Image: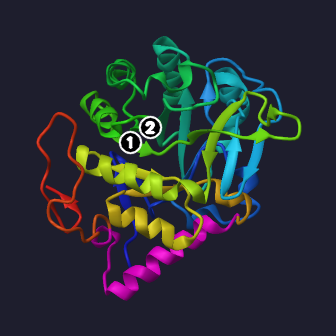
């Protein structure tokens, strides 16, 4: 029996729910040498900013016992360089292309969305309002619900492409931020971006990263990411794209069971470039064991005791039955 792994995020239809996260594989062509892009749902490009960025001062990466700290700082050619150099690279990739953008202010976000919309290569736009490595502006639009509404409300009228707001976990109530994005027309939210972290060299008595603080990713954050996704799937009705610490193929199944409509695989690809393909195979095997023909039967299938959902801040709690919010 052929199983249907396709999922929809707004008007974006993915052949399966496995994406490669932003910042891992550049713009896809290099990755294509290692895996078949026809086997995964799509890629999220390196984040594009309005102006070219050289990135942060080194050291920019530090391996930790169960993850990785990075402070890359969104090194990229800027919008003009993206349109001139990277768009031809992206054209014709045999999978969905989701272009990630990050602005220092609302007008920059608007310019970026209009530029990407006009490029003709994007199937969706991931709005990165959660980068911890580009100075104070990096996370402010996803740590304040009012600012999240401001930026999402400004860019929504500028494109018909699906907009996916990428959220930071470095907040107390991530559900509030997700609701703000939903109220202003976001088609989906993706989470989590990295957790703010730090590494110290006791020998030199100095921070290891050039920027002192960085973003922690990798297996250490998976339980934290699952909890954030669990909160958000109960707070909003739009699709949730889950990520954070996916290291084994079965990790992707766990995010889908929580209610995530798709997943993004990131840091672990440095050790195993084939992990995204492995996640697709694992989802298919899981459906086979379930005797199910559709991934829809897996999404939100977590069995949770009645009343054990997360209470929405300022709102009445939703009733949770069998892992699905109602």
First in residue order: circle 2 vs circle 1: 2
Q: Is residue 159 visible?
A: yes
Q: On the image, numbered disc 1 is attached to which residue?
A: 189
**Quadrant where the C terminus lies?**
bottom left
Distance between the alpha carbons at the discs numbered 2 and 1: 7 Å
Which residue is at 36% across, 49% downward? Answer: 240
Location of residue 305 by image quarter: bottom left
Q: Do the numbered discs 2 and 1 sit on residues whose CB atoms are within 8 Å?
A: yes
Q: Is residue 314 magenta?
A: no
Which residue is at 72% across, 21% downward? Answer: 52
Q: On the image, numbered disc 2 is attached to which residue?
A: 167
Residue 274 image position (x, y, % from top left): 67, 68
Which residue is at 82% across, 35% downward? Answer: 59
Location of residue 15 by image quarter: bottom left
Judging from the image, what secondary structure is the residue with disc 1 in?
strand
Choose between 124 and 24: the one closer to the eye: 24
Front disc: 2 or 1: 2
Judging from the image, what secondary structure is the residue with disc 2 in?
loop
Q: Residues within 10 Å of mark 2 (few under 14, many from 20)?
A: many
- Residue farthest to the right? 204
For the magenta stretch, what is the residue range? 273-298
Location of residue 324 by image quarter: bottom left
Choose between 211 and 151: the one closer to the eye: 211
Q: Is residue 1 visible?
A: no
Q: How is the image coloured?
A: rainbow
């Amino acid at each position: 029996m052929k199983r249907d792994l396709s999922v929809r995020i707004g008007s974006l239809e993915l052949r399966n729910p496995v994406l490669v996260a932003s910042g891992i594989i550049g713009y896809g062509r290099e990755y294509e040498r290692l895996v078949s892009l026809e086997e995964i749902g799509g890629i999220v490009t390196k984040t594009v900013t309005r102006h070219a960025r050289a990135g942060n001062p080194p050291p920019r990466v530090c391996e930790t016992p169960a993850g990785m700290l990075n402070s890359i700082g969104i090194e990229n050619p800027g919008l003009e360089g993206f349109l001139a150099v990277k768009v031809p690279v992206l054209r014709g990739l045999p999978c969905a292309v989701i272009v990630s953008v990050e602005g220092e202010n609302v007008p920059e976000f608007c310019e970026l969305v209009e530029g990407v919309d006009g490029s003709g290569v994007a199937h969706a736009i991931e709005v990165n309002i959660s980068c911890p490595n580009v100075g104070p502006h990096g996370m402010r639009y996803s740590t304040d619900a009012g600012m999240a509404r401001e930026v999402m409300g400004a860019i929504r009228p500028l494109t018909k492409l699906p907009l996916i707001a990428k959220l930071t976990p470095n907040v107390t109530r991530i559900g509030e931020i997700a609701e703000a994005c939903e109220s202003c027309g976001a088609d989906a939210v993706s989470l989590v971006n990295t957790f703010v972290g730090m590494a110290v060299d006791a020998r030199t008595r100095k921070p290891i990263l050039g920027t002192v603080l960085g973003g922690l990713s990798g297996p250490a954050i998976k339980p934290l990411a699952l909890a954030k996704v669990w909160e958000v799937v109960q707070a909003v009705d739009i699709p949730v794209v889950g990520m954070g610490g996916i290291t084994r193929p079965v990790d992707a199944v766990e995010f889908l069971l929580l209610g995530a409509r798709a997943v993004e695989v990131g840091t672990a690809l440095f050790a195993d470039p084939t992990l995204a393909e492995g996640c697709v195979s694992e989802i298919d095997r899981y459906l086979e064991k379930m005797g199910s023909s559709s991934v829809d039967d897996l999404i939100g299938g977590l069995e949770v005791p009645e009343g054990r959902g997360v209470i929405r801040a300022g709102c009445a709690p939703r009733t949770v039955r069998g892992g699905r919010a109602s």
